[in-house]
Image (spheres, rainbow, N blue to C red):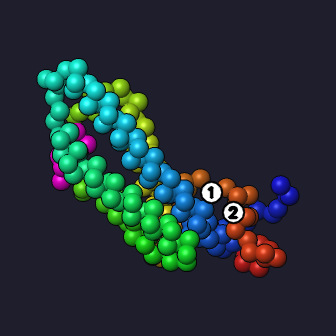
Amino acid sequence: MAHYKQMNKTAKKELLTRKLTSVEYMTEYVEYFNQMVDSLLMGMGAFQQLQKQNPHVDAHNFSAWESRGLPNLKGDRAYAIDALKKAKAGDPSYLSSSAGNLRGISKDVDNIGGFGEWWQHIDKKYEDDFFFKLRKAKKTGRNINYTICGYWDGDKILNEEITGHIDEADLLKYLKPNEKLDDIS
């Protein structure tokens, strides 16, 4: 990649805004959401196998996950997939809404008794994988939601502890044709 001068705050902020509202980034969010639900399904499948082998294992709130938690997340996933189609057609508001809904997952989880002790009875890799993907989906979703809705205060969009790593070289691909950094600085 060609050498470029370091971006000033104004250019970095503009290009990051373009990235966080791009279809490419929105697709990442939906992929993380899909992976999170798939990971939950794998963990639940492992617990169901354990229950067959040991019917007396403490299921805690597993039935609530089967009847409410999983169906809610599957519905949210279907909404996110549909919202991505709408974003690709030029209307990102539905995807922003999907991302905003995911931010509220902890409240939904509290309503079914938390994430549950059933995770403790299966291989830790399932829980770790689910939470890793949940964090990725929530972070990308929050970035999308905050950017589309204009919720960023000042330069907080540039705070990598909030948005994640910002690769300036990667941001260059969000320059418009024939646009230069000086044009947006």
Q: Is residue 29 visible?
A: yes
Left or right: 113, with 89 as reference point = left
Identify the mark nearer the N-term, 1 or 2. 1
Question: Which x, y percent locates residue 134?
Answer: 41, 48
Q: Nearer the viewer, mark 1 or mark 2?
A: 2
Q: Which mark is residue 184?
A: none
Question: Which x, y percent locates residue 133?
Answer: 44, 45
Is residue 67 found inside the magenta-colored segment of the image?
no
**Could you tell me which residue is drawn at 44 percent across and 66 percent down?**
82
Question: Which x, y percent locates residue 185?
Answer: 72, 76
Classify 31 as above or below 49.
below
Q: Secondary structure at mark 2?
A: helix
Q: Nearer the viewer, residue 79 or 26?
A: 79
Question: Which x, y percent locates residue 24?
Answer: 60, 62
The alpha-carbon separation of the residues under discs 1 and 2 comes to 8 Å
**Could you tell me which residue is drawn at 50 percent across and 53 percent down?**
31
Task: Name the main secondary structure of what is drawn in magenta.
Answer: loop
Amino acid type of the residue tagged 2 in the rendering: Leu
Classify 28 as above or below 94.
above
Count neighbours of disc 2 (C-alpha within 10 A) and say few if under 14, some if 14 to 19, many if 20 or more: some
Is label 1 in contact with label 2 (beta carbons under 8 Å)?
A: yes
Is residue 111 found inside the magenta-colored segment of the image?
yes
Count neighbours of disc 1 (C-alpha within 10 A) and say few if under 14, some if 14 to 19, many if 20 or more: some
Q: Nearer the viewer, residue 146 or 117?
A: 117
**Could you tell me which residue is drawn at 70 percent across and 68 percent down?**
174
**Could you tell me which residue is drawn at 39 percent across and 70 percent down?**
97
Picture quarter with the N terminus: bottom right
Q: Secondary structure at mark 1?
A: loop
On the image, numbered disc 2 is attached to which residue? Answer: 171
Bounds of the magenta segment? 110-116
